[in-house]
């Protein structure tokens, strides 16, 4: 028989791993509560134009990595490569700027990019992210960054670094782009072919190139920070002041440009100082034209996204405890045909009372059932045989201490709750 495999660049989250993912999700949702962000869920595919018009057609994501397809009616669709454009599309479509409490949004879910798979880089990967749309106040920038920082701290992560930058607005970019073009033109022959195109269309993206030669050349390129106009300078220093007041450590890294076209002013990344090549845990920034580009008002937003997979690697590297793997509290041992209906009743009653219970109707002998209970690592077994049925009792056995007691059947719940405490 033919054996099947997951598609290249994708993976299964197996039961023995899924509790780690739940730990991240749970901590993320707790953080959203703390900062009062509400969930938004958008489709996994969108009209591809949403990304082409916003993320930008000079970005790698749109140029090379998008999973584009036509549906049966010839509509041009794309599996979403990122979360911001869909959230903004929905924000505009549903007039969320007019609804109360709808400017602070979060999302969780899979994203798709056709990239060369490697450790920490997949074709289907999972992101968590937030967007705060409608204010240009630098306090909001600081708060979005604070959210990311708080979340990682809350997970227990230690070795990460917050890097911030300002990539200016349209105003300052004009001069900066000229300076960059002048600088890189001197090295034109040494740049990779992608960067040659970038230099024409969006010179800042050369700073973001991962090719070694381009990186070396970019080291001495002019810094955006020297080209910021007064407004952008004031905005950037206000963020730094707020972050300092919040006691959030940061470094300024003028090389952060972010790969996507829609960013302006604030750009930030959080990197794991121990991970190798794929070390960006979270990337984010302010976007001033995106809402308008997608048909909305002239308002600005800021957000970030982070990947689950890299975060998981970082957490594992730092030996973080993810909480407990899921297991039942009680294993039910039924000893025969005559007791099976009573067993079903008790099991159902346990669950109604919030006690998780496992029962395997295919295991018949006491031995087999006890063995399975041990394997599952449960603390309690409830054992029902003919004698117990007659006496209106059940045996409650603590599998850790091997102590057991006969309990009246209407006292089972109480007995388990008391024993759980001991
Ligand atoms: P981006 O949307 O490119 O700014 O990426 C934000 C974050 O998503 C990165 O910092 C990574 O943690 C994660 N990420 C991006 N692309 C991938 C990928 N192909 N595989 C796994 N994680 C990714």
Image: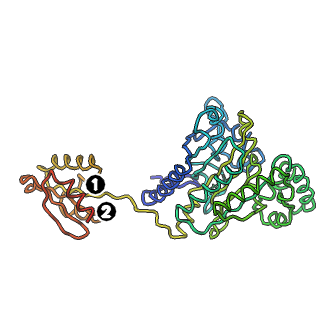
Q: Position of residue 160 (x, y in %)?
A: 62, 66
Q: Is 96 positioned to the left or the right of 185 in the image? A: left
Residue position marked by numbered label 1 in the rendering: 358
Q: Position of residue 98 (x, y in %)?
A: 63, 32
Q: Is 13 positioned to the left or the right of 244 in the image? A: left
Residue 289 vs residue 370, the one in the foreground: 289
- Image point (64%, 63%), residue name: 247
Residue 295 vs residue 361, the one in the foreground: 295
Q: How is the image coloured?
A: rainbow
Q: Which disc number belongs to residue 21? A: none
Q: Secondary structure at mark 1?
A: strand
Residue position marked by numbered label 2 in the rendering: 376
Mark 2: give few (<14), some (14-19) or many (20+) Cα within 10 Å: some
Q: How many marks?
A: 2
Q: Is 80 positioned to the left or the right of 321 in the image? A: right
Residue 51 vs residue 94, the one in the foreground: 94
Q: Is residue 291 above or below residue 381?
A: above
Residue 372 seen in the current view: no
Q: Is residue 20 above or below residue 97?
A: below
Q: Is residue 307 above or below residue 39?
A: below
Mark 1: give few (<14), some (14-19) or many (20+) Cα within 10 Å: some
Q: Position of residue 419 (x, y in %)?
A: 23, 62
Q: Is mark 2 within 8 Å of ligand 1?
A: no
Callout 1 touching callout 2 (CB < 8 Å): yes
Query: The C terminus appears in which quarter of the rendering?
Result: bottom left
Q: Secondary structure at mark 2?
A: helix
Residue placed furthest toward the front: 245
Residue 387 seen in the current view: yes
Earlier sequence position, callout 1 versus callout 2: 1
């Amino acid at each position: 028989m033919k054996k099947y495999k997951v598609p290249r660049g994708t993976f299964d989250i197996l039961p023995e791993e899924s509790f780690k993912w739940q730990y991240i999700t749970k901590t993320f949702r707790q953080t959203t509560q703390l900062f009062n962000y509400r969930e938004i869920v958008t489709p996994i595919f969108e009209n591809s134009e949403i990304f082409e018009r916003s993320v930008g057609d000079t970005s790698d994501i749109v140029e090379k990595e998008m999973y584009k397809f036509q549906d049966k009616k010839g509509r041009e669709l794309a599996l979403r490569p990122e979360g911001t454009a869909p959230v903004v599309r929905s924000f505009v479509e549903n007039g969320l700027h007019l609804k109360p409490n709808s400017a602070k949004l979060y999302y969780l879910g899979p994203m798709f990019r056709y990239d060369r798979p490697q450790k920490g880089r997949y074709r289907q990967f999972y992101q968590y992210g937030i967007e705060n749309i409608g204010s240009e106040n630098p306090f909001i920038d600081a708060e979005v960054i604070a959210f990311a920082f708080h979340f990682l701290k809350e997970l227990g992560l230690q070795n990460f670094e917050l890097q911030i930058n300002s990539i200016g607005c349209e105003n300052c970019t004009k001069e900066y782009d000229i300076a960059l073009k002048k600088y890189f033109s001197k090295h034109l022959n040494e740049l990779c072919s992608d960067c040659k195109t970038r230099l024409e269309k969006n010179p800042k993206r050369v700073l973001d190139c991962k090719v070694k030669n381009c990186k070396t050349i970019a080291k001495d390129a002019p810094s955006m920070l020297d080209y910021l106009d007064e407004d952008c300078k004031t905005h950037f220093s206000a963020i730094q002041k707020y972050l300092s007041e919040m006691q959030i450590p940061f470094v300024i890294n003028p090389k952060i440009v972010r790969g996507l076209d829609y960013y302006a002013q604030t750009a930030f990344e959080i990197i794991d100082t121990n991970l190798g090549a794929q070390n960006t845990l979270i990337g984010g920034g302010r976007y001033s034209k995106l809402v308008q580009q997608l048909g909305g008002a002239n308002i600005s937003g800021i957000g970030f996204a982070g990947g689950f997979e890299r975060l998981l690697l970082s957490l594992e590297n730092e030996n973080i405890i993810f909480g407990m793997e899921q297991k039942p509290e009680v294993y039910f041992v039924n000893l025969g045909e005559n007791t099976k209906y009573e067993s079903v009743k008790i099991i159902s009653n346990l669950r109604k009372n919030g006690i998780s219970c496992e029962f395997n109707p295919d295991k018949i002998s006491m031995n087999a059932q006890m063995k399975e209970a041990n394997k599952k690592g449960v603390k309690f077994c409830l054992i029902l045989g003919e004698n117990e049925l007659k006496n209106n009792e059940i045996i409650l056995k603590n599998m850790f201490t091997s102590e057991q007691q006969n309990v009246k059947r209407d006292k089972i719940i109480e007995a388990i709750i008391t024993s759980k405490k001991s």
